[in-house]
Image (tube, grey):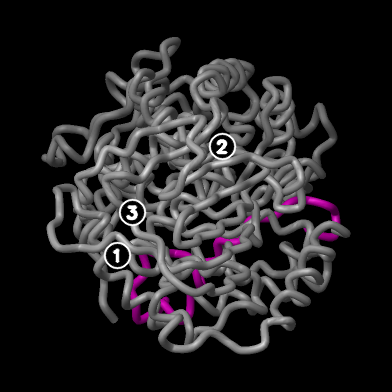
Amino acid sequence: MMKRMLWIFSLCLILYSCKEPLTEEVQAEIQVIPRPQVITVLEGTFEMTSKTSIKANRDLMVQAEQLRDYLSPASGYVLPINKRHTGGNLIELKLLDELSTLGEEGYEMTITSKKVLITAHRSQGIIWGIQTLRQLFPVEILREAAVDDVAWELPCVNILDKPRFEWRGLMIDYSRTFWNISHTKKYIDALSYYKMNRLHMHLTDDQGWRIEIEKYPALTEIASQFDTVYHEPREREGYYSREDIRELVRYAEARGVELIPEIEMPGHTTEVFAAYPELSCTGDTLSVHPFFKGPGIHNEIFCAGKKETFEFLENVLSEVSELFPSEYIHIGGDEAPKVLWKTCPHCQRVIKEYSLKDEDELQSWFIRQVEGYIQSKGKKLIGWDEITEGGLSGTATVMFWRAGMENALLSAVEQGNMVILTPTSHCYFDYTYDRISTEKVYSLESIIDKIETLNPEKILGVQANFWSHIDRTEPGMDRQIFPRLLVLAEVGWTEALNREWDHFSPRLEHHYQSLDLLDIYYTDE
């Protein structure tokens, strides 16, 4: 907490020391989203030409090559990477120990007429500095073919920047509609461009299991396919192979994005019972159906009293832990009806054996068993806010989605749990723009304020969620998520004292052309 307070205090001093606000002319040049914390405008411009070089040491070679690949298609220049270049017209990437106050993701950028220098304490900061650099170039730099008659000029500036929150995420529902690798890579690119660092992959739900698990082949042979009676288009079903996941992890890591797997439990699991019915309380074999062709929430959930349930989950989580290097695994925990637990002899035996008060406490017991295994794999558990019901361990991270659960949210913070804010009131991007406008997303601060008053260190971050049961086409999905994702990117990155909607709105309109060039559909409110 002290480090954050010192950072905010220093930021206030820097902002206060700026004699004049940025003029409209300068604002027109600095069209960066999310807005950097401190921008000092210098005189002149830097121009990238065919003679420009990139300088980086061995530790930053991956980032240097990524920068070259970003700039090459539109400019037509394949910039050489030279570890010893000392002349002018240079873009240099450098790690500095003295920038430790900028944390894992902060960076500093200085652009003069002769040189672009991006420095950071860690390589993640270099990645974000590169994305800021891309946004400072003329927007045509995003084109995939060479562009004539564009001067690749950058304004001379000094930027000091670091994120407000560690977690800045987007959840995509892959169960109700499966999205292929190329689509996911497009979203990883967009997240990285706007410094969003988490892609939460909702891989399992009643509508389909979307990840290969070697020990349980029926999960992909049966549970990933809609029952043929529903005549669903084949492209809406399927799964990621283990190699697909590895490919996506590599792609995301190179762009500063962490993939977070979600394996739903104890509810939202009827697709599992299509393949392994013995894991439910009833043992009935169920079918996999589209969202609107059956109950929205099923009574059939994992049996909490069968040892086979936990053997299955541990085996699944073991493979998931191997595939995803993230320190987090999301286990769902939401919308789990307890009606069958009330009459299941296996579940009632556990309630009696462990002196649990009721089925809510049984769910908490269930979650604790799973959390213990996740921790044994060196991971941390995240769950939707229902995991607070019936008691909550002090080490779980809670993702608050129900807008009316502020008391539970504050209680979790008081207990010491980390929280991620993703309320339906501001962050459910499958909702219409009439319900959640771009400006309303920007007002998420009203909820953040309540927690920061209590304990600001317990806010891990913010996240948008997209459930794919209504908009099941790429253009439809894009238009629901964009441009609202850009709004949340700024809320998650930029300190509140440095943000105003009237300043953000013109920048957002400027970025519509960027979205066009990134091949992203969007809603222009």
Marks 1 and 2 sit apart, C-alpha to C-alpha, by 50 Å
Q: Residue at x 48, y 84 (%)?
A: 503
At label 3, which amino acid type do we have? Met
As drawn, the residue found furthest toward the front would be 87
Q: Which residue is mark 1?
A: 138
Q: Residue at x 36, y 25 (%)?
A: 247
Q: Which residue is mark 2?
A: 266
Quick check: 228 above or below 176? above
Taking the magenta stretch, the answer to whether it contains residue 53 is no
Looking at this view, is 423 or 311 the one in front? 423
| Left or right of 509 on screen, residue 371 | right
Mark in front: 2 vs 3: 3
Residue 262 in view of the camera: no
Coordinates of residue 373 in the picture (x, y in percent): 69, 23
Q: Which residue is mark 3?
A: 48
Mark in front: 1 vs 2: 1
Marks 2 and 3 sit apart, C-alpha to C-alpha, by 55 Å
Answer whether labels 2 and 3 touch (C-beta < 8 Å). Answer: no
Q: Which residues are magenta?
A: 413-441
As drawn, the residue found furthest toward the right would be 2
Coordinates of residue 340 in the picture (x, y in percent): 55, 39
Q: Quadrant of residue 228?
A: top left
